[in-house]
Amino acid sequence: MLTWDPPDERYYEHGLDRGVLFIPGKDPIPWNGLTGFEEGSAGTSSMLYRDGVVYLADAEASDFSGKMDALFYPDAFHECIGLPEATDGLYVDNQKPKRFGLSYRSLIGSGATDDLFGYQIHIVYNCMATIAPRSRQTLGKDTQPVMFSFDIVCTPVKLPGYRPTAHYIIDTRAMSPSRVTDLEELLYGPGDLPTPEELFDLMHFGDAITVTLHEDGYYTVEGASENVYSTGPYSFQMDNINGADLGGGYYSLSDGGNTDVIIE
């Protein structure tokens, strides 16, 4: 039977933080002044009629674009908006913008645990930006910072098996803490922005279920969400496994070969 509004499933999205700028050939650069990102699309729908009756209803996939707001931006972003530094302190306006990548985090709240329940990491590839006009005024009684706004267009990149897109979203709620740590080390550590294929290879379990026994007697179980999932605050379920109930609260899990793991 269906149930509505359980306290632990009242999710909502809010906030934006951990902006990161990726320029090809450079290490990731934190964007501390990022205040907003408006995610856009250009999808269309159509309806065809025959004899006054809908014959075909169809919707076309969209291409990603966006609008970015910031109180300030990293120095390295100058070249991405056509304002490169010719020599120390000398910037030349109205030049050709350069491509860049972008990452930011959006938060997910829950009716049971408030605002910091989880988060999603957004990754945007092959961006090009144009800066909106800025209005500068004399100082008055109150400080009014200049807000910077950028229109973003992107060239899609392909993940095999899917239509090319420039926008990928990683929902960490379905990931183990260790896998999130590995992902963030790859994303925020030295080097270029990881490709969609690299992200997929890191996050994809396939049909595998990994059981790790620890020295303190505890164990962790990792697998795809359709195979390993929570059934309550202190319980989980594993499907599609080779296992046996040994009695006395003990279970045997097999990898299909010669290795068995006994868990309690």
Image: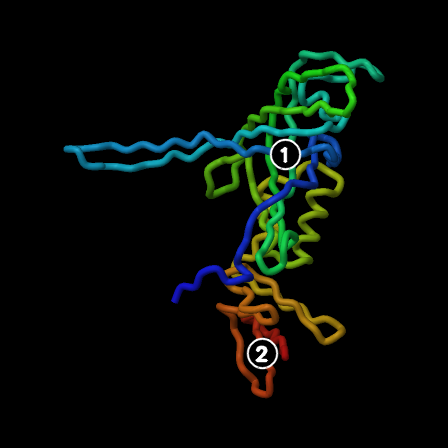
In the image shown, does 37 or 43 lie closer to the viewer? 37
> Which sits earlier in the primary sequence, circle 2 or circle 1?
1
Q: Residues within 10 Å of mark 2 (few under 14, many from 20)?
A: some
Q: Which residue is mark 2?
A: 252
The image quadrant of residue 4 is: bottom left
Residue 80's x, y, as percent?
68, 23
Question: Which residue shows up at 54% across the image and 71% down it?
Answer: 256
Q: Nearer the viewer, mark 2 or mark 1?
A: 1
Marks 2 and 1, how far apart at CA? 50 Å
What residue does disc 1 label? 36
Is residue 257 positioned above or below 5 on the image?
A: below
**Residue at the spot 61% in from the left edge and 63% down from the top edge:** 222
Neighbours of disc 1 within 10 Å: few (<14), some (14-19), many (20+): some
Locate residue 12, reporting x and y percent.
55, 50
Q: Amino acid at mark 1?
A: Gly
Residue sitting at 77 percent across and 19 percent down? 140
